[in-house]
Image (tube, grey):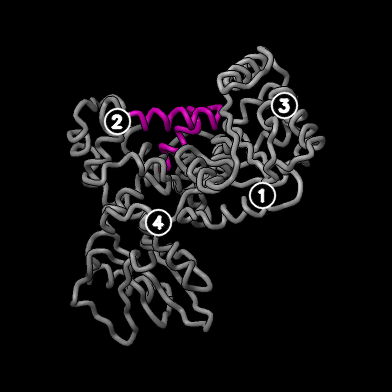
Amino acid sequence: MLTGREQETAFLENHYKRTGSQILVVYGQRGVGKTALLTSFTEKKQTLRYSAGNCSSREQQYLWGRELRSRGKEIAEYPSWRELLECMTIQKGETTADKKVLIIENFQYLLKGDTLFLQELIRFLKEKKEALLVILTTYASGWVENSMISKVGNLAFSVSGFLKVKELPFAAMRKIFSDYTVQESISLYATLGGLPGLWRLLYPQNSAEENLIRLLLQRNSFLPELMIKWLSEESRETAVYDTILATLADGRHGKLNDMYAHTGFSRAKISVYLKNLMELELVEKVLPGTYEICNAFVRFYFCFLFPHQTSERTEGSTFYEKYIREEYNDFQLLTYRRICQEVLQGRFRTVELWNSRQGKIYFLCREDTGRKIVVDYSGTVCYTSKDYDVLQASMKREHVTADSILIFSENGYEKTLTEGTVQILVHSVDENS
C-alpha cells in the first residue's frame, strides 16, 4: 500500500467491492499524487484509461476514437459517447468476471461545455450487465467544489463519492524520501509542501539548497510558471488574488485591518477573496482575524519570486544569496510550527495556538488526564535560554500555567536553561516519523 495513503486506498477499495457499477470523482492539485495513488490501487485490477483534452466535444470524440483504433479496435471516425464507452469497456470473447476500473483523467474537459457525456455514462452503466468502477480525476479542485454540482445538477446524485487527495503530512514525506536529513526535509517541506510529484523532481545527491535553486530559481525553471498557470485556472480575477497573497506573504499584514490599509481594497472585498482562497486551501485563519498562506509552494513563490520579478535569474545561486538566504530560516519557521502541530495533534486531546502579547506564537495542549503542556519551538536553530526567558515572561504576564514545557528543536538547546519546578522536555519532529 502506498505510504501515507491508507485512508484514500481504503475508500477506493470499499467502492470497488460494492455490488454493481459506481462513479467516483478523485481530485487534488497537480503533484499531490493522484496518479501514484490510482496506479497503486489498480495494480492487480483490469484497468482502462483515457486522458481528456481541452477541446470541443466533437474533437474529443474524434481523438478518443482515433486512440482506440490505434489499439486495434473498430470504431467510427466520429463516434458517439455511447459508442466510445462500449468500445472502451467491452471486449469480444472476454470471460473474466472481475470488476473493471475505467479511469478518465482531466474529466472537467468533458463537462465544461455540456453534460451530455455524463448523461451517457450514467445511462451506459445502468444498462451494462458487467460491473464497472469509473474514476473521474482532475486537478481542478476549485471547479469540483464550487462549480461542478451546479453544472451537472441532478446528475450529481449518480456519483457514488468524492475523494479529495490532499498533501501528505511531513511524517509521511520523511518515510517516502528518507535520503534527506531532518533539517533538509524541513527545508524542502517549507517550499514544496507535501506534494510527492514535486519531491520526485529532486536530485537526492544534491543538498536541499542546490535542489531549490535548480528547480525554482534558474531562468528555465518551469515550476514557477506552472504555479502561475494553476492559480490562473483556479481563480478569475488573478490580480486581486495575487495582491492578497503577496500581502499575506509579506508577513506583516496577516490581519484584516492591515490588509485593508496595505491593499486599499474594502474589508468586504478582502473577506470575500479570503473566503475563496480558504476554499482552495491556499489560505487559512490561524487565529481570530489572522490569516496565513498554508500552501507551501504558493507561499514560497509570493515571498521570494513574486516581489523580485525584474531581477535576473540566469544565475540561481546569485538570486538565492541576494533575496533568500538571510530570510529562509524565518520563512521555514512557520512550516516547522505546522509540522509540530501535526505531531502534537497525534499526542494530545486538545491543541490550541496561543498568540502572546509579544507576538510570539506557542501551543497550549491538554492531555486526557487534564495535565497542561505549553509548547515552544525553535526550528532548525538552537533553542536558547533567551527563548526560554521570553516564554517564561509571557506565561507570567498572561497568567498561563503548565505542568510541563515541551520544546521542539532540531539543533539542540543550551544546557543553561533554568528548569525551576516545571518539567522541560526537548523533542524532535523526526521522532514521530
Q: Which residues are magenta?
A: 222-250
State which mark lies toward you, 3 or 4: 3
**Residue underneath mark 2:** 308
Measure the C-alpha gap from mark 3 to mark 1.
22 Å
Label 4 element class: helix
The number of numbered discs placed on residues in the rendered structure image is 4
Measure the C-alpha gap from mark 2 to mark 1.
49 Å
Q: Which residue does the image show at 53% across and 73% down from the upper left?
A: 349
Residue 73 vs residue 205: left or right? right
- What kind of residue is marked 2? His
Measure the C-alpha gap from mark 4 to mark 2.
29 Å
**Residue underneath mark 3:** 117
State which mark lies toward you, 4 or 2: 4
On the image, the x and y values in percent for residue 307 come to: 33, 32
Measure the C-alpha gap from mark 3 to mark 4.
39 Å
Measure the C-alpha gap from mark 3 to mark 2.
45 Å
Q: Which residue does the image show at 40% across and 73% down from the upper left?
A: 374
Q: Which residue does the image show at 29% across and 30% down from the upper left?
A: 308
User: Is 245 covered by the magenta stretch?
Assistant: yes
On the image, the x and y values in percent for residue 396 come to: 37, 76
Q: Which residue occupies the foreground of this view, 351 or 201?
A: 201
Placement of 56 over or under 27, stated as above or below: above
**Residue underneath mark 1:** 16
- What kind of residue is marked 3? Phe
- What kind of residue is marked 4? Phe
Q: Quadrant of the C terminus?
A: bottom left
Q: Which residue occupies the foreground of this view, 328 or 22?
A: 22
Residue 97 vs residue 359: left or right? right
Q: Earlier in the sequence, mark 3 or mark 2?
A: 3
Q: Are marks 2 and 1 in contact (CB under 8 Å)?
A: no
Q: Are marks 4 and 2 in contact (CB under 8 Å)?
A: no
Label 3 element class: helix
